[in-house]
Image (cartoon, helix red, strand yellow):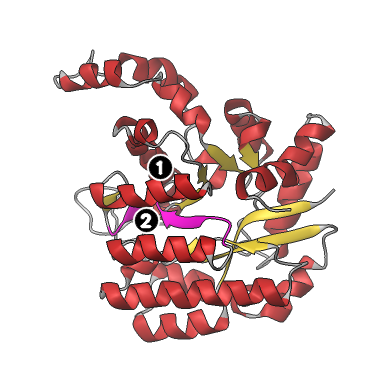
């Protein structure tokens, strides 16, 4: 069965060289990537891919987010270099890499929209990747609305990748997150918060055709279905902010129904319980295959292998399995 890995990460050579120039200080997130040969060694990536039958990758750039480059003009230039680099890889290995997800400099509002349009229309990008916050700013901020409107117009999805570093503390009395809590628990939280802000700020009402793919099985949303459902049905009734109750009446759908409209991927690192939970919440038509390679203890093959194993062991029909492995990806992105 054809398997289209819709969310895995790479640093192509020209992009990586430019990133090192613009961001010479090594961050925790960049150190994670630099320790994985498959991130920059294309031959190693191909060797890993050879281990799996009918397996292809849709490429996307790895963190850090491009908007961490302080100068907006430099950030926009880096996004352009990265997207051209990804397109070149797809042209060189079309059977390996049938498409790519474009990167954007979200700290440059004008370039953000222009590069999204160029990447999709001129380069053939399948969609764009953004992060759950933009240097601490929420995605429902007004300057990002034109991007959502454009992607709905282009009929291409937006991938949301969580963004939170060790400098985001877990307690107000500290200045740093310890024990990589910022990643293990912080990232699912970040994804969930980003989705919630798009719902309650009425972005999803204003841009109803917007397609959002949430990394890591939709973050915390599936497990907290009861809180998202009956819990948020009481929005405003148990707080001093009366505006929340008015907001609830203004939404066109129940809060939980907006969340079910999002798409989630299978990047659960081999957790069958997490993937079963995500499928129960989103349904097989809203789940896409993704491995999050190459960030595993084996530096590449493990997350791919374990994700495939979990999907193959699911008690679902072959039709649903096809949807997850490739059908939903083709429908969402226009891939042949």
Q: Is residue 317 left or right of residue 75?
A: right
| Few, some or many residues within 10 Å of mark 2 (<14, 14–19, 20+) | many
State the CA–CA distance, disc 2 to disc 1.
Answer: 10 Å
Q: Is residue 262 visible?
A: yes
Specify start and end residues of the magenta stretch as a single range.
125-135
Q: Are marks 2 and 1 in contact (CB under 8 Å)?
A: yes
Q: Secondary structure at mark 1?
A: helix
Which label is found at residue 189? 1
Q: Which mark is residue 201?
A: none
Q: What residue do we see at 29% from left, 61% from top?
A: 109
Q: Is residue 236 left or right of residue 23?
A: left
The residue lying at 71 percent from left, 59 percent from top is 302
Q: Which of the pair 28/213 is nearer the observer?
A: 213
- Where 203 falls versus 280 (above or below)? below
Q: Quadrant of residue 125?
A: bottom right
Question: Residue at coordinates 37% horizontally, 56% vertically from top-left?
Answer: 164
Where 313 sits versus 49, above or below?
A: above
Q: How many marks?
A: 2
Instruction: Please determine whether, in this image, residue 328 is positioned above or below residue 166.
Output: above
**Place of residue 329 in the rendered image (x, y in percent of width and height, measured from the top left):** 66, 47
State yes or no: residue 130 in magenta: yes
Residue 45, percent across and down?
70, 73
Q: Which mark is residue 164?
A: 2
Q: Is residue 143 left or right of residue 23?
A: left
Which residue shows up at 62% across the image and 26% down it? 280
Point out residue 85 in the picture as x, y percentages from the top left corner.
56, 77
Q: Is residue 222 visible?
A: no
Q: Residues within 10 Å of mark 1 (few under 14, many from 20)?
A: some
Secondary structure of the residue carrying numbered label 2 = loop
The image shows residue 332 at horizontal and vertical percentages of: 61, 44
Which comes before the other along the chain, label 2 or label 1? 2
The answer to whether residue 249 is magenta is: no
């Amino acid at each position: 069965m054809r398997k289209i890995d819709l969310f895995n990460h790479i640093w192509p050579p020209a992009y990586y060289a430019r990133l090192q120039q613009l961001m010479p200080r090594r961050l925790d997130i960049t150190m994670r990537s630099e320790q994985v040969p498959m991130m920059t060694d294309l031959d190693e990536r191909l060797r890993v891919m050879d281990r799996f039958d009918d397996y292809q990758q849709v490429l996307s750039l790895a963190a850090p987010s491009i908007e961490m480059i302080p100068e907006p003009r430099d950030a926009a230039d880096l996004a352009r270099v990265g997207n051209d680099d990804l397109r070149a890889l797809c042209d060189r290995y079309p059977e390996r890499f049938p498409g790519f997800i474009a990167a954007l400099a979200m700290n440059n509002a004008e370039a953000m929209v222009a590069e999204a349009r160029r990447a999709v229309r001129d380069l053939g990008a399948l969609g764009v990747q953004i992060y759950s916050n933009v240097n601490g700013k929420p995605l429902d901020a007004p300057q990002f609305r034109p991007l959502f409107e454009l992607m709905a117009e282009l009929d291409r999805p937006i991938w949301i990748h969580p963004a939170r570093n060790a400098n985001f503390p877990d307690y107000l009395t500290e200045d740093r997150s310890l024990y990589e809590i910022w990643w293990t628990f912080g990232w699912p939280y970040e994804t969930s918060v980003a989705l919630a802000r798009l719902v309650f700020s009425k972005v999803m009402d204003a841009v109803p055709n917007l397609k959002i793919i949430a990394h890591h099985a939709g973050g915390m949303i599936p497990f907290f279905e009861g809180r998202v459902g009956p819990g948020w049905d009481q929005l405003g009734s148990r707080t001093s902010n009366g505006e929340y109750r008015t907001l609830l009446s203004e939404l066109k759908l129940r809060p939980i129904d907006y969340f079910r409209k999002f798409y989630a991927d299978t990047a659960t690192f081999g957790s069958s319980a997490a993937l079963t939970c995500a499928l129960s919440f989103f349904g097989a038509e809203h789940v896409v295959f993704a491995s999050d390679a190459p960030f595993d203890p084996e530096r590449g093959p493990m997350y791919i292998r374990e994700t495939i194993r979990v999907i193959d062991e699911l008690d679902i029909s072959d039709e649903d399995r096809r949807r997850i492995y490739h059908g939903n990806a083709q429908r969402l992105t226009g891939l042949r």
